Amino acid sequence: ASLFAGDINVWKNSTLNKILQRGELRVGLDPGYMPFEMKDKRGRIIGYDVDMARKMARDMGVELKLVPTSFDGIIGGLLSDKFDIIISGMTITQKRNLKVNFATPYVIIGQTILMKKEHEGKIKSYKDLDKKDFVISTRTGVTGEIVARKFFKNAKIITFETEADGISEVLNGKADAFIYDQPYNILFMSDKGKGRVVHLDKPLTFEPLGFAIRKGDPDFLNWLNNFMRQIKEDKLVDFHQKLYEKWLVD
Ligand code: ARG
């Protein structure tokens, strides 16, 4: 008799079992969202998510393969088995959660606004920006777009294929404001945005970020949730705190 009392087919079909058999963890991500995944000067993908993915692969005893994928098609890529998991600064939304499962979140963010310098002092919140003559830019298919459409009923909304193109529109004067995840906006302010844009940094939303996997896979989800608890709460190793300080606190 086997000690395994579960459904052996569930385990055989589990993504976790397939990763172990293959000896490789394939992670889907869209580099462009600093500090979570971005390219360094040599074109290598680095960031908070990448460090977590590397630790995950190490704990599984397998190799790590990063699969760069446009955020727009990233859930489709997961569902068609182009990779095993999405680790890409993805907000857990109730709509996405109908298609994929999420592991317990690793960080909470919210949408904030970067606006033109000339609006400084005059515009105090998103409400002042929701006027017919204003243009709001964001990225296609992200929560920034969802929030822009929800909060701005009068202003014109334009969307771009990358976050960098979205904020460029404010720098070149074609848009009044850019709406996107707070960590990105904070980093933008400490670098390219300094003295050129103003950060309305009060979050407009509550957005937990989590790893996404295909549905119907309790074995993989269990492993991920326990991995997450360990890295978040293990104060002796403090992996998550170090990551937080490395990427999110300057
Ligand atoms: N948190 C936002 C969302 O889930 C933006 C994520 C964009 N991620 C990326 N790797 N470009 O919609």
Image: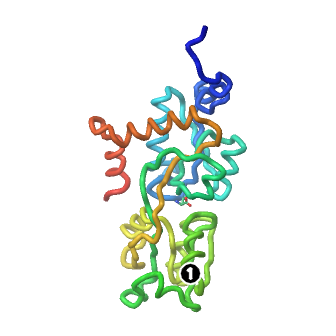
Q: Is residue 136 left or right of residue 193?
A: right
The residue singled out by tag 1 in the image is 152
Task: Give me the residue at 54% from left, 31% from top.
Answer: 63
Place of residue 67 in the rendered image (x, y in percent of width and height, measured from the top left): 61, 44
Looking at the figure, which quarter contains the N terminus?
top right
Q: Reply above or below: 144 against 244.
A: below
The colour scheme applied to this rendered structure is rainbow
Place of residue 78 in the rendered image (x, y in percent of width and height, measured from the top left): 66, 45
Task: Please identify the residue farthest to the right as the structure is shown.
Answer: 80
- The answer to which image quadrant residue 52 occupies is top left
Q: Reply above or below: 247 against 240.
A: below
Question: Judging from the image, what secondary structure is the residue with disc 1 in?
Answer: loop
- Number of other residues with Cα within 10 Å of mark 1, as a class: few under 14, some 14 to 19, many 20 or more: some
Looking at the figure, which quarter contains the C terminus?
bottom left
Q: Amino acid at mark 1?
A: Phe
Q: Is residue 155 or residue 165 the one in the foreground?
A: 155
Place of residue 144 in the rendered image (x, y in percent of width and height, measured from the top left): 55, 68
